[in-house]
Image: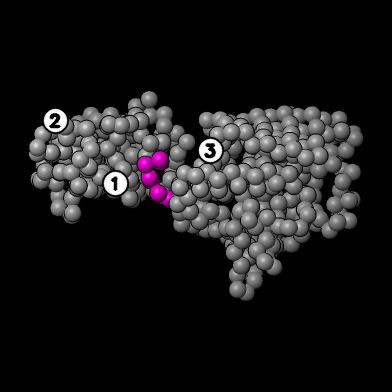
Amino acid sequence: MIRQQRTIKGSFVYEGIGLHTGKPVRTVFHPAPPSTGVRFRRVDLSPAVEIPASVDFISAEEIRRNTTLENKEAVVHTVEHILASASGLQIDNMIVDIDSDEPPEPRDGSCTPLVEALQKVGFENQGVPVRFLKITKPVVFAQDGIELYALPYKGFKLSFTIDYKNPHIGIQYASFDVTPELFVSEIAPARTFVLWSDVELLKSQGLIKGGSLDNAIAVDAKGIVNNVSLRFANEFVRHKILDLVGDLTLVGAPIEGHIIAIRSGHRFNLKFARLLAQELKNQQRTSGADKRGIWDINAIQTIMPHRYPFLLVDRILTLEDKKRVVGIKNVTINEPFFMGHFPGHPIMPAVLIIEAMGQVGGILLLSAVDAPEKYLVYFIGIDKARFRKPVVPGDQVRFELEMITLRKRFCKMKGVAYVDDQVVAEAELFSSIIDR
């Protein structure tokens, strides 16, 4: 799995009432630079305090009904719906200014109102790759009858089972391959629910001061107290999946794997998130891939099908979504083509310079589509090719390509190759994306 990091296109205001505090609250959502992650900023404090959405900032306070983050004395409660909306829509970087200690609860208890606000402002690819936590071996958590598993899987899949004694909830199961489109239609609309028998207990604990029968489904022994129709037959388990999507955001990277949860809630979701965060650190340490935002050879091999001896790109230095890309090829005497081109006078074949240029352009093209690993880039034309200077062992060739036209699966790029800031080759390339 690979894709570009993305943020929102602009800032917008989202206001309402905190679910547990009952306080009026104003949040302002802002774009953020690559590799920022999601961060909350308590702007009601002086100076403002920033609280990253990370397992390192999970509150030490034992809170079972929501997800709370803290940074020293500053806390922000009930962040799971904002985190779920960001994760479900694949928003990697965002700043959320908040003038209270709890964000507003969406008016109907689901994520749909916030998701619609985020969709309205739109999203922007940021030209740097996302680092995924790839589950390569089972990760298991079990405590007090609660079970959570992470299993290898090509994609992001969530399966959840709940088991309530209340007959109107009972045992429910749901499983989804989570994509932004599926999240919007099948998960985000699922509303918060509460057992009516727990309402007085929650009130006695100083919670749900902003809760009402308008922003939650209340269930007692006779059925749904607020007499509303369910949006899905298994809406209750879908909301549990929604909460889990939000809590897993704290791992620090999107997950490539299958997450299975049985009877879990926020408290155990967060414990599992800590396990997965440690797995992420282990992977980064052993692979050396702890620098986010770099199109290194690992990222290149994820997006490109080429392999030795025909992968001719070593690193992408700059990528502007659908506009421009800069990549390099380090030319060594060990290149297999030097054995015959030419013995005693090694020169990189001009056709391979164009091929390397095309591969750099292919990364620009493929990085702009969903699931780029499912596609190939074909040359369909080369025009105005010129070769100004030989490329020899020891050279580092820098390829700079600009998108001239892009229409659906067809594009035209202008490419220039440099060695030590001297032009060695240039061409106009015509390419097409096809299914792999």
Q: Is residue 327 left or right of residue 72?
A: left
Image height of 421 relative to 227, above or below: below
What mark, if any, has residue 134 been given in the picture? 3
Q: Secondary structure at mark 2?
A: loop
Identify residue type, mark 1.
Answer: Gly
Q: Earlier in the sequence, mark 2 or mark 1?
A: 1
Q: Which residue is mark 2?
A: 340
Image height of 238 relative to 422, above or below: above
Q: Nearer the viewer, residue 105 or 414?
A: 414
Marks 3 and 2, Cα distance to the nearest angstrom? 41 Å
Q: Secondary structure at mark 3?
A: strand
Marks 2 and 1, Cα distance to the nearest angstrom? 26 Å
The answer to whether any part of residue 330 appears in the image is: yes
Q: Which residues are magenta?
A: 293-299
The residue drawn where x is 46% and y is 57% is 33
Q: Is residue 194 left or right of residue 399?
A: right
Q: Position of residue 91 (x, y in %)?
A: 52, 47
The residue drawn where x is 14% and y is 30% is 340
Q: What crowding class fits label 3: few (fewer than 14 Cα within 10 Å), some (14-19), or many (20 or more)?
A: many
Q: Which residue is mark 1?
A: 327
Q: Earlier in the sequence, mark 3 or mark 1?
A: 3
Q: Secondary structure at mark 1?
A: strand
The residue drawn where x is 78% and y is 49% is 64
Q: Is residue 38 left or right of residue 410?
A: right
Is 174 colored magenta in this rendering? no
Marks 3 and 1, Cα distance to the nearest angstrom? 26 Å
